[in-house]
Amino acid sequence: MKIKLWGVRGSLPTPMPGDCFADKIRKALTLARPGDISSEESIDAFIRSLPFSIRATYGGNTTAIQVVTGSGDLIIIDCGSGLRMLGHELVKGDFGKGKGIATVLISHTHWDHIQGIPFFAPLYIKGNRFNFYSAFPDLKKRLEYQQAYSHFPVSFDYLPAIKEFFTLESDEELHVNDTKIVNKLMPHPGAAYGFRIEDMGRVLVYTGDCEFNIDEIDHIENYRNFFSNADVVIFDTQYTFEESIDKLEFGHSSASIAIDIAGMFDAKRLILFHHEPNYNDEKLESVLFNAKTYLSMNAGRVKGMQVDIAYEGMEIQL
Ligand SMILES: [Zn+2]
Ligand SMILES: [Zn+2]
């Protein structure tokens, strides 16, 4: 399966402040030597050599993930503001002709997981079909409420694409051709559900929003089937460890607890996700650095697991 991350921020879309651009250019120029800017090639090589936080940005759009299965089926996981750019990409193909079909998995309806829907161009094209799956029997009502006239000028029902709603029982298996999808209730205020996607022998686990604190770790064996032997785990690690203690019951985890859990269940790769809106690119780079330090300190327990941090546009081939 092919995975692309279109939105990786948690809670609130977070555009980069204007003065950050000048700051990045200043830092890059400070590091440049005359040979680095002597030709197009040397400039490209120099840019590639810069730390990610200087040459790029992790991105400010909220959660939206595109999965294309081995059978070519499109699965969209969560519909935060990153969904808008995915929509622009999709309308270049079948969705632009009203012939697109997608399975949409909604972890929960906090704003950062549904706010891209009113701006998703394929929903405005007749003939496209979206099958919405969630554990919430009233999901359609919740999406209609988001687009009540007092909140948005176009109602959800007006959107001409076909929109079907299916309610998943907890732990229920859903099959899309040869792809198996299992949902799992996560510890999160108001309830959120993670999804485990198995396709062509590969496993993607998406936790959705989740707070694995000390109390929840006592019950971690309940999550073994959900996490076990994943090729990739995309984990809500909104807070640093220190902040997660200050913000108990805010509903989010830290990188260190994610490493503990993903490592415990033999994940091959962990992706830190759902970034805190108050963290800039430098801070997120330090989150990754600290996570890698924690990982190396626990190398005996986590058996060669790789840790990366999500950025907008990140692609993963499984
Ligand atoms: Zn969230
Ligand atoms: Zn949430």
Image (spheres, grey):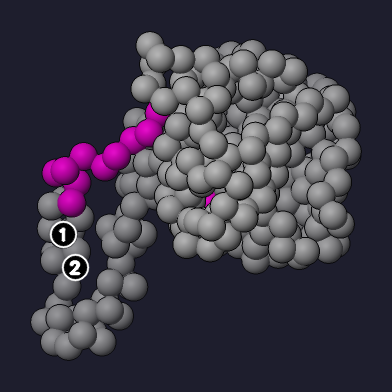
Residue 310 seen from this side: no
Residue, disc 1: 25
Instruction: Find disc 2 in the rendering and name its residue.
Output: 31
- Amino acid bearing label 1: Ile
Q: Is residue 122 visible?
A: yes
In percent of width and height, residue 216 lies at 74, 21
Q: Is residue 19 left or right of residue 116?
A: left
Q: Position of residue 37 (x, y in %)?
A: 15, 81
The stretch of residues the image draws in magenta is: 4-21
N-terminal label among 1 and 2: 1
Q: Quadrant of residue 264?
A: top right
Q: Is residue 102 left or right of residue 89?
A: right
Residue at the (81%, 43%) spot, across then down: 181
Between 39 and 286, the one lying in front of the other is 39
Neighbourhood count class around disc 1 (C-alpha, 10 Å): few under 14, some 14–19, many 20 upward: few
Between 296 and 94, the one lying in front of the other is: 94
Please say if 103 is above or below 269.
above
Residue 66 place in picture, x, y as percent: 59, 51
* 10 magenta-colored: yes
Vertical position of residue 158 compared to residue 34: above or below: above
Q: Amino acid at mark 2?
A: Leu
User: Which residue lies at the image location 30% right of the left edge and 67% below the top edge?
Assistant: 50
Q: Residue at x 64, y 22 (%)?
A: 140
CB of mark 2 near ligand 1 (< 8 Å): no
- Badge 2 marks a residue whose secondary structure is helix
Closer to us: 80 or 132 = 132
Q: Quadrant of the N terminus?
A: bottom right
